Amino acid sequence: MSSQSHGALSPDTLRAMVAGILTTFEHPTLKHNLTALKALHHVALMDGTLHIEIKMPFAWGGGFENLKETTSADLLRITGARAVDWRLSHDIATLKRVKNQPGVSGVKNIIAVSSGKGGVGKSSTAVNMALALAAEGAKVGILDADIYGPSIPTMLGTEDQRPASPDGKHMAPIMSHGMATNSIGYLVTEDNAMVWRGPMASKALMQLLNETLWPQLDYLVLDMPPGTGDIQLTLAQNIPVTGALVVTTPQDVALIDARKGIVMFEKVAVPVLGVVENMSMHICSNCGHQEAIFGSGGAQLLAEKYHTRLLGQLPLHIHLREDLDVGEPTVIRRPDSEFTALYRKLAGAVAAQLYWQGEVIPGEIAFRAL
Ligand SMILES: Nc1ncnc2c1ncn2[C@@H]1O[C@H](COP(=O)(O)OP(=O)(O)OP(=O)(O)O)[C@@H](O)[C@H]1O
């Protein structure tokens, strides 16, 4: 099609032209195209610049970058504009929660991050994914519910802080790297928490969730205690979770436990969003050599067998551990690294899966009654 003089286009024609191109855009996060999603929020052509605003119901920073790269040239050609001024805004949908439970004040969606066994990198994944969701454009918080090893404060560099209580009843979350966070680790010593019986632990965690003064959040990432015992089952049943992730390593023993995690969530009707494979490859920090030291392909097979999906794979690399040890997760410390790109891809896949798998609660207003 030949270029047209931009002065000659009516708003409707312009919109139809732009929509025509955007409709053809395909991306792994899109089950239906952008027009079906009503994502084209604003189009205008002024002084040779084409202004386009895309509004999305789930965190979509990565998809948006891809959209710009893929369609800008065509848009310029078809509209005759000299430049495109792209804008992405979000109006993140609130999705149906397990058992239709009422939500937590201020929080639209809760994503539980679990693992069948300890030490597979659940907390590392939760914290980097939460920061990646924020980098993708969402308002994000993280709650460390891992009574057996509350490591989020260390990973966020906030271990010396304690939540204040402005009214003697609620806790103000601690802010770190732009994210609201609270942890069972701020409230009890590790030795204390370890000996809690199930009901005590679950009660404390429910309090932590409900009595934190969360700011308006699109996603609250919940770092669950590892395993599939009573505490995990009680939490999965009582927390108004939107969906759950199961983190595993490619080792057979971890995969067996990850399977138990999937089954546990299915039992209590928590939608499983998918599996995340951590430490899928070891990358040598000297030579870059990659080695599948824990085996390969297992998480993919597990996901297929249980009719879910592999949402991301993260390598085993010394930078990931070092960054967490100094309280500056890789997504913050190395925003342009290949690791951050992987976490952002995972975050985008999780946000999209949550949306497409869920059912939108129209017009719910998350209010806080104090
Ligand atoms: N992909 C990775 N590359 C390098 N180190 C990693 C990676 N994932 C996790 N680690 C490191 O492994 C250790 C355990 O990770 P993490 O605490 O996230 O595991 P977890 O599954 O949450 O453990 P727990 O179940 O005990 O809470 C940490 O020191 C972390 O920095």
Image (spheres, rainbow, N blue to C red):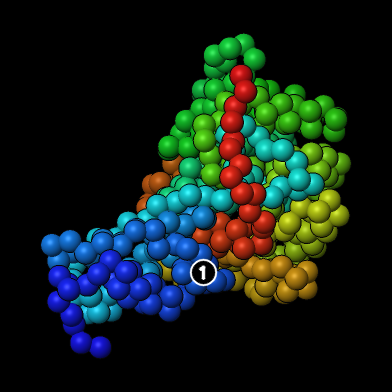
Q: Position of residue 189 (x, y in %)?
A: 68, 23
Look at mark 1 in the image and give the residue it sits on.
36
Q: How many marks?
A: 1
Observer-nearest of 194 and 176: 176
Q: Is residue 70 above or below residue 267?
A: below
Examine the image and state in which quarter residue 42 appears: bottom left
Q: Is residue 206 left or right of residue 129?
A: right
Image point (75%, 27%), residue name: 204
On screen, residue 337 versus residue 14, left or right, reads right
Image point (37%, 56%), residue name = 88
Residue 290 place in picture, x, y as percent: 50, 71
> For mark 1, does the 10 Å Cα neighbourhood hold few (<14), some (14 to 19), or many (20 or more) residues?
few
Which amino acid type is shown beneath numbered disc 1?
Answer: Ala
One can see residue 311 in this view: yes
- State left or right for residue 352 relative to residue 260: left
Residue at the far bottom: name it.
1
Residue 304: image x %, image y %? Answer: 73, 74
**Residue at 52% from the left image edge and 31% from the top image edge:** 215
Q: Pick whichever, 136 or 293, lies toward us.
A: 136
Residue 313 at x, y = what percent? 57, 65
Q: Is residue 4 above or below residue 110?
A: below
In the rendered image, the quadrant that contains the C terminus is top right
Residue 316 visible from this viewpoint:
no
Q: In the rendered view, would you say 161 is above or below 271?
A: above
Looking at the rendering, in which quadrant would you find the N terminus? Answer: bottom left
